[in-house]
Image: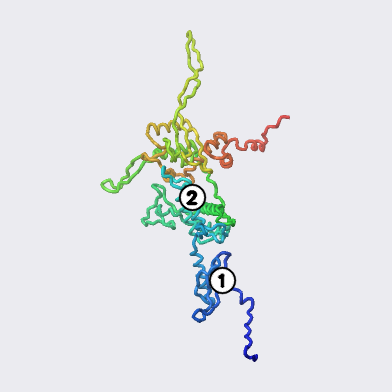
């Protein structure tokens, strides 16, 4: 056959290595979506199709962006990639339907971690008592803090949690107004919602003021984030180590009351009367003095000062043994006491010592709620009440018929926070006096009286280290040996 029957095939131009390498945009990390350039090719209808950017995730072409070549098209494709990444499912299920485990930090959203933590701390509802068991004490407050965390961390992944972002979060929170301003008559910016010029009030008497978030508040929210991340790591949700950097702790509250201040606070609560203003009729504008509204608060202050107990167990304490509540047990015990009696024999008066049985009233405070587990950071030991408080407790229960240590109109008082703040404001105390100041006062008085530190720590439910660090300087024997030695008065050892 002639040579021209099979003409030689034309040689294809050889492309450089750079032109054959796949083109990709938006690569931020392994496992994250990115853009892949699919070259143009003829379709099934024979029409040439141009190149287009596709979104690729986990080795699969998810969808086409419809964007071709050019800088403007690339910007539009990257914008679609960002929208696709933001709309990813928070919880990516595995083959068994549960969340995928052992993922890298860049593949786990903070929103997923917070959602799992909030669900884990919800606990379960006990149908018998109607109370929540197994979760945190105030789940609603945890939910509020998680909601605030989500507004800043929700679209971020765990690999973005570091010292820089934690500091940025703290800076974004410090100085912002509290959400509770809506209940105080203030808007979110701390400004009055009414324009009548009258001073706004919080509760009944304490004026409202624009309260803002401090570093301590931001630290508390970041502590929840740290706990949520630690739970995710413990459950194997991620294989990477993530650390949350907290802002430094604020100064510890060390305000305690003197005997005169405590007496003024106690009698101020006992003598507190309700004052109402007549709004209609011939007596309009007249102020009328009504009920005693501080007697329950005075009982709370008295128990707190005499026992150093936290406000929660006091407000919830019941004189009747009830499931889920602390119990104030009132009982009697018989003891033998020595007495001196006079005896006349043959006109002579003699004294002799005799032992007679004496029935004594006793009050035992079971601070830990019945059927509840004691918190590790809040000890609640069972203690006997002081003798000068026992008679008050007996009268409240057996004479006045109270079923709870602190009650109002026959019902237990859930919290004395507002009434105590109002009382302190009316008596001229500063904002540094809060309910917990009563606990500080009780421990301080115990140290000043020379009570053994081990005994005092066991009675109030604190650690010995805590009392030594915060209250040791109130003791008259605090560092007495060092003081005497440096003063040149230390006794020399015998040879």
| Residue drawn at (67%, 34%) of the image | 490
Q: Residue 253, relative to residue 146: is it above or below? A: above
Tell me: 133 left or right of 278: right
Give the label on residue 25, or none.
1
| Residue drawn at (50%, 19%) of the image | 355
- Nearest to the observer: residue 325 or residue 120: 120
Q: Residue 54, relative to residue 263: is it above or below? A: below
The coloring applied to the image is: rainbow
The reply to whether residue 425 is in sight is: no
State the image coordinates of residue 275 (x, y, percent, origin top left): 35, 43
Circle 2 SS class: loop
State the image coordinates of residue 137 (x, y, percent, origin top left): 47, 46
Q: Residue furthest top?
A: 346
Q: Residue 310, relative to residue 192: is it above or below? A: above
Q: Residue 421, relative to residue 354: is it above or below? A: below
The reply to whether residue 154 is in sight is: yes
Is label 2 in contact with label 1 (beta carbons under 8 Å)? Answer: no
The crowding category of the residue bearing disc 1, from other C-alpha atoms within 10 Å (few below 14, some 14 to 19, many at least 20), is: some
| Residue drawn at (43%, 36%) of the image | 321
The residue at which mark 2 appears reads as 121
Tell me: 436 left or right of 488: left
Q: Residue furthest front?
A: 1
Split into 4 quadrants, where in the image is the C terminus?
Answer: top right
Split into 4 quadrants, where in the image is the N terminus?
Answer: bottom right
The crowding category of the residue bearing disc 2, from other C-alpha atoms within 10 Å (few below 14, some 14 to 19, many at least 20), is: some
Mark 2 and mark 1: Cα distance apart in space: 41 Å
Give the label on residue 421, or none.
none
């Amino acid at each position: 056959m002639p040579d021209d029957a099979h003409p030689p095939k034309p040689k294809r131009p050889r492309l450089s290595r750079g032109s054959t390498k796949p083109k990709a945009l938006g690569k931020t990390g392994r496992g994250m979506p990115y853009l892949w350039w699919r070259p143009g090719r003829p379709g099934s209808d024979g029409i040439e199709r141009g190149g287009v950017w596709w979104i690729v995730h986990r080795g699969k072409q998810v969808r086409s962006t419809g964007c071709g070549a050019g800088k403007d098209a690339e910007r539009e494709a990257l914008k679609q990639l960002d929208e696709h990444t933001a709309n990813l499912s928070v919880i990516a299920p595995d083959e068994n339907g549960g969340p995928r485990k052992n993922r890298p930090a860049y593949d786990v959203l903070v929103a997923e971690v917070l959602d799992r933590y909030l669900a884990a701390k919800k606990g379960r509802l006990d149908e018998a008592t109607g109370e929540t068991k197994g979760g945190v004490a105030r789940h609603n407050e945890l939910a509020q803090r998680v909601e605030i965390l989500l507004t800043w961390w929700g679209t971020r992944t765990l690999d973005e949690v570091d010292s820089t972002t934690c500091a940025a979060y703290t800076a974004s929170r410090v100085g912002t107004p509290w959400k509770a301003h809506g209940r105080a008559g203030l808007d979110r910016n701390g400004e009055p919602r009414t324009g009548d010029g009258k001073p706004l009030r919080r509760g009944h008497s304490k004026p409202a003021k624009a309260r803002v978030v401090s570093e301590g508040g931001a630290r508390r929210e970041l502590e929840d984030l740290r706990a949520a991340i630690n739970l995710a790591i413990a459950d194997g949700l991620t294989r990477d180590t993530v650390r949350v950097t907290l802002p430094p702790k604020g100064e510890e509250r060390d305000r305690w009351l003197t005997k005169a201040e405590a007496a003024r606070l106690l009698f101020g609560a006992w003598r507190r009367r309700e004052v109402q203003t007549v709004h209609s009729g011939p007596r309009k504008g007249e102020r009328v003095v009504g009920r005693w509204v501080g007697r329950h608060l005075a009982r709370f202050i008295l128990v707190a000062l005499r026992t150093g107990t936290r406000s929660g167990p006091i407000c919830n304490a019941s004189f009747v043994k009830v499931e889920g509540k602390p119990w104030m047990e009132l009982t009697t015990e018989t003891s033998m006491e020595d007495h001196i009696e006079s005896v006349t024999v043959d006109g002579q008066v003699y004294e002799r010592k005799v032992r007679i049985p004496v029935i004594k009233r006793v009050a035992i405070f079971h601070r830990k709620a019945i059927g509840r587990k004691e918190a590790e950071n809040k000890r609640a030991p069972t203690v006997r009440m002081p003798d000068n408080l026992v008679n008050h407790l007996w009268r409240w229960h057996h004479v006045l018929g109270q079923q709870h240590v602190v009650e109002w109109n026959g019902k237990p008082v859930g919290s004395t926070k507002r009434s105590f703040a109002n009382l302190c404001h009316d008596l001229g105390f500063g904002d540094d006096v809060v309910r917990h100041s009563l606990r500080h006062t009780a421990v301080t008085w115990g140290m000043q009286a020379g009570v053994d530190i081990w005994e005092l720590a066991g009675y109030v439910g604190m650690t010995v280290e805590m009392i030594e660090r915060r209250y040791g300087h109130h003791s008259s024997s605090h560092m007495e040996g060092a003081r005497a030695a440096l003063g040149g008065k230390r006794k020399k050892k015998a040879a």
